[in-house]
Image (cartoon, rainbow, N blue to C red):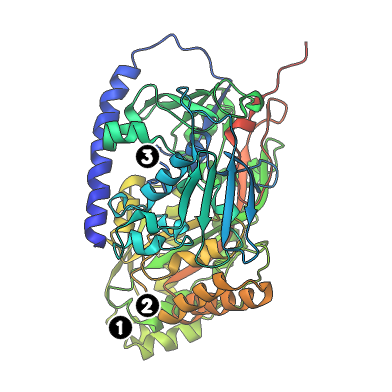
Amino acid sequence: MVSSRRARRFIRRARFLFYLSALAVVCGCSRHEPPADLTIINNVEPESLDPAVIVAQADSRIVSGMFEGLTRLEPVEAKAVPGLAQSWDISPDGKIYTFHLRTNLMWSTGERITSADVVYSWLRALDPKMACRYVEQLYYLKNAEEYNNGKITNAALVGVSAPDEYTVRAELKSPTAFFIDLCAFQTLAVVPRQTIEKYGDHWLMARPLPVSGAFELVTWRLNDKIRLKKNPYYWDATNTQSEILDILPVGSPSTALNLYESGQVDIVWDKELIPSELMDVLIKRPDFHAFNYLGTYFFRFNVTQKPFDDPRVRQALALAVDKERITKKITRAGELAADQLVPPGTQHYESPPGLGHDPERARKLLAEAGYPGGKGFPRFEYLFNASKIHEKIAVELQQMWRDELGIDMELRSVETQVFWGMQQRLEYQLSKSSWAGDYNDANTFLGMFVTGCGNNETGWSNQRYDELIRAANDEPDLAKREKYFQDAETILVHDEVPIVPLYIYIGINYFDTNKVAGIYKNMLDDHPLQSLRRIKPKP
């Protein structure tokens, strides 16, 4: 089941890139484009612009500007507020949400958006053929998981329906405290059924492409840029601050900084696009904006491969890592060395203690596992996507494990899109990883390691862990819910250790506040495109 879903996903992406390459030739012919209001560097080329396909935060930034859900995130605190739905009612038991759509909703091509479009979009993401890696975000609906797993085939049994053109009824399995936040997430965004059914896998190539969000797609030129223009039919178009945005795919920190310094771009998102060797100097500048946000850097074990199927081995490697050495020597932006996955500042939650740094205990555990002093331990490989910061961290881990445990690790750097595919297919032994919260709740971090989750990507499964996560999400009492999550996180980062947290991110964007407005320091590092605007100079 899993392998066939991955195969469908791979084939769909290959076809998509083929059509996109052909389209790029045509779209690249125009040399008389009007200038953009703002030009943004958004890290590497998106994998897709399909809300049901994308995974990376960089892709989501673009997609959320094109396709909106029942709710959307406001820019200041990144809280969910009314989007396509102007209001909603919640039943006394917290299990039924009745959303009332705005009556002026239209696709960018002029047709009406109705409740049937919402139902279609959610069921499409749940369709097993989509192999949606964020599909678990919809599992809170009644019968959604069973439909996605093929246990039931009648979509009418899934807990989403359209009683009339302006009403969406969502029936949940149990009360879900963050369901309104989920409705702002990309997977639940509303997509155009009429276009998808006409063009199939390459529906994003349609021109004009119907969108439900603030911006419509003008061009996508591979390795050049994505151009978006204001959608005049968007329900809140009067408050969309820019007419045209250009978004550039740049993965090199030095290139990003050079383009910014030369005035060719206005905004650079992602701390990874700051040259690490210049971090100490750049972070002191007024146009480099640092802030706390919900993001954790960690690495994963592929627990299906020996010797990493042994928790003692995983614990040994974790205990041998001096995390403060990484944050002080390499990242140098004030990151917090972490023994936990869930970052501080997550609402209604405080993480339990992790393993800490204890090389002596690490050596004892490795000896218990049959590798005293590292003797007989096979050489293994650490996978990471091409980036100076990831490479430096990998080299540091390599040195720590050689010095403390007497084991040797090889490094393997691959292009980012190749990296995502290899990690998803478990074609690695150890793998660099990171996670930014999709909403402000512990579940956005802990929920992805339940058995079978598309973002688990470790091969790890633990029945007790799964039970605790389910219990937490069924529990309305916040104190009891926190305890369930704490017990689960203890299993994850202390007992079983399929992952090893290294540090909590510090978010950094760079832009000149005298030239750009609409970007705020929020815990999700989420900055809606419709809020961005260029500040006009005073006459």
**Which quadrant would residue 157 be assigned to in this image?**
bottom left
* Residue assigned mark 3: 48
In this view, 59 is above or below 176: above
Q: Are marks 2 and 1 in contact (CB under 8 Å)?
A: yes
Q: Position of residue 330 (x, y in %)?
A: 54, 55
Please tell me how many numbered marks the rendered image carries.
3
Q: Quadrant of the N terminus?
A: bottom left
Query: Please, what secondary structure does the residue beneath circle 2 have?
Result: loop
Q: Position of residue 320 (x, y in %)?
A: 48, 76
Q: Which is nearer the N-term, disc 1 or disc 3?
A: 3
Query: Please, what secondary structure does the residue beneath circle 3 have?
Result: loop
- Within 10 Å of disc 3 (Cα), the crowding (few <14, some 14-19, many 20+) is some
What residue do we see at 30% from left, 52% from top?
Answer: 421
Q: Is residue 415 visible?
A: no
Q: Find the distance from the CA under tag 1 to the CA under tag 3.
A: 45 Å
User: What amino acid does circle 3 point to?
Assistant: Ser
Q: Which mark is residue 375?
A: 1
Q: Is residue 311 visible?
A: yes
User: What amino acid does circle 1 point to?
Assistant: Lys
Compared across the picture, whether 476 is left or right of 431 comes to: right
Q: Which mark is residue 406?
A: 2
Residue depth check, mark 2 versus mark 3: number of the one nearer the observer: 3
